[in-house]
Amino acid sequence: MTYTAAAVIGVGAALVLDVLVLRTRLVATRQWWAAYGIIVFFQLLTNGWLTGRRIVTYGPDAIIGDANVPFVGDGRLAWAPFEDLGFGFALVLVTCVLWVRLGRRSPGAD
């Protein structure tokens, strides 16, 4: 399985968990997108630094683009592959969905 396919599956699974399974529907709120905007900014800084300096590298056959590491283009944004944005989105969304869901079930939750 390529990194691209895994990222697409991860985003899809996170959205299904949020909207259909646990029904927290975070992606339908302004608060989620405002918070995620802050998170993605720092994700791009971190991923860009790691991939731009080639501390982290990706096999060109597993991602969109090739071994070229431009700032923007060839399947990259701020040096990081687009797939990293998908994985970051899925990771943060699942974490927040579980946090909200478990908070609603805890004693004394409103």
Image (cartoon, rainbow, N blue to C red):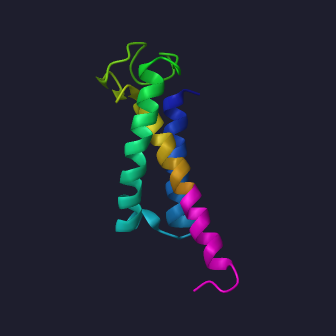
Q: Nearer the viewer, residue 39 or 59?
A: 39
x 38%, y 13%: residue: 68
> In which quadrant of the rendered view does residue 99 lie?
bottom right
The magenta region covers 95-110
**Position of 109 compared to 15: left or right?**
right
Position of residue 66 measured from the top left corner of the image (x, y, whole percent):
41, 15
Position of residue 79 measured from the top left corner of the image (x, y, whole percent):
37, 25
As drawn, the residue found furthest toward the top would be 67
As drawn, the residue found furthest toward the left would be 73
Position of residue 38 measured from the top left corner of the image (x, y, whole percent):
38, 52
Which quarter of the figure is the N terminus placed in?
top right
Residue 97 colored magenta? yes
x 37%, y 44%: residue: 41
Which quarter of the figure is the C terminus placed in?
bottom right
x 51%, y 41%: residue: 87
As drawn, the residue found furthest toward the right would be 107
Residue 107 colored magenta? yes
Q: Nearer the viewer, residue 21 or 81?
A: 81
Total numbered badges shown on the rendered structure: 0
In the displayed structure, 55 sits above or below 37; it is above
Position of residue 69 measured from the top left corner of the image (x, y, whole percent):
38, 17
Does the magenta stretch mainly form a helix, a strand or a loop? Answer: helix
